[in-house]
Image (cartoon, helix red, strand yellow):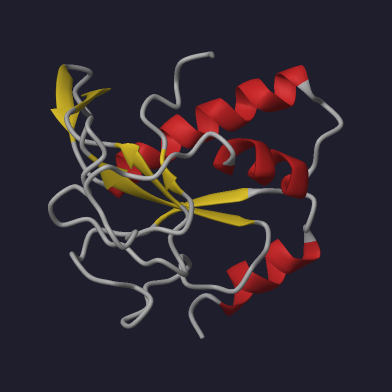
């Protein structure tokens, strides 16, 4: 019920792509849902954290139905609240990398809406060399911040 307003807003704005974290509970959210990641929305892209080689990061959530992508989100350079550089990890740090990719794609294709944008992002995913069967729906994007 806590996510009903989010779900209603996302459904009312089907043209927008919502990029969310799968969470960091170390669990399969297909069997133990985490919200908003487990909401049944076509305009939702769920991201979890991987290491730089395509392995699910320790503590990151996964799910072959509800989680779309693994993206490197470990040891990401950030600024702390004092303005000092540091590093952080987790699926929440993978999400901005995908959001940056989405922004670049929208700049190149301003007429795209959620379906086209989501298709273009997930088309960049490749199967992880470490997870058989897959732990996410579409696979792993090695470097979403780099232009190809």
Q: Nearer the viewer, residue 42 or 85?
A: 42
Q: Position of residue 100 (x, y in %)?
A: 52, 27
Quadrant of the rendered structure where residue 127 is? top left
Compared across the picture, whether 81 is left or right of 144 comes to left
Extreme residue in the right direction: 111
Extreme residue in the bottom direction: 1
Q: Position of residue 143 (x, y in %)?
A: 39, 24
The residue that appears at 22% across and 56% down in the rendered structure is 60
Compared across the picture, whether 124 is left or right of 21 comes to right
Please tell me how many numbered marks the rendered image carries: 0
The residue that appears at 21% across and 47% down in the rendered structure is 130
Q: Position of residue 17 (x, y in %)?
A: 66, 48
Q: Position of residue 32 (x, y in %)?
A: 31, 81
Compared across the picture, whether 134 is left or right of 52 comes to right
The residue that appears at 27% across and 58% down in the rendered structure is 132
Task: Determine whether 55 is above or below 38 in the image.
Answer: above
The residue that appears at 43% across and 34% down in the rendered structure is 96
Quadrant of the rendered structure where residue 28 is? bottom left
Compared across the picture, whether 18 is left or right of 108 comes to left
Question: If the image is split into quadrants, where does the C terminus sit?
Answer: top right
Q: Nearer the viewer, residue 8 or 144?
A: 144
Quadrant of the rendered structure where residue 102 is? top right
């Amino acid at each position: 019920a806590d996510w009903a307003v989010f779900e209603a807003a996302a459904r009312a704005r089907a043209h927008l792509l919502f990029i969310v974290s799968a969470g960091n509970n170390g669990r399969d959210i297909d069997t133990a849902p985490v919200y908003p990641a487990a909401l049944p929305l076509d305009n939702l892209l769920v991201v979890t954290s991987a290491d730089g080689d395509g392995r699910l990061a320790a503590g990151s959530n996964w799910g072959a139905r509800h989680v779309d992508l693994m993206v490197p989100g470990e040891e990401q350079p950030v600024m702390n609240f004092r303005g000092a550089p540091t590093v952080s990890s987790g699926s929440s740090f993978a999400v901005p990398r995908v959001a940056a990719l989405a922004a670049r794609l929208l700049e190149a294709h301003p007429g795209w809406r959620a379906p086209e944008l989501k298709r273009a992002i997930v088309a960049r995913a490749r199967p992880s060399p470490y997870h058989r069967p897959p732990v996410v729906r579409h696979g792993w994007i090695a470097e979403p911040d780099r232009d190809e």
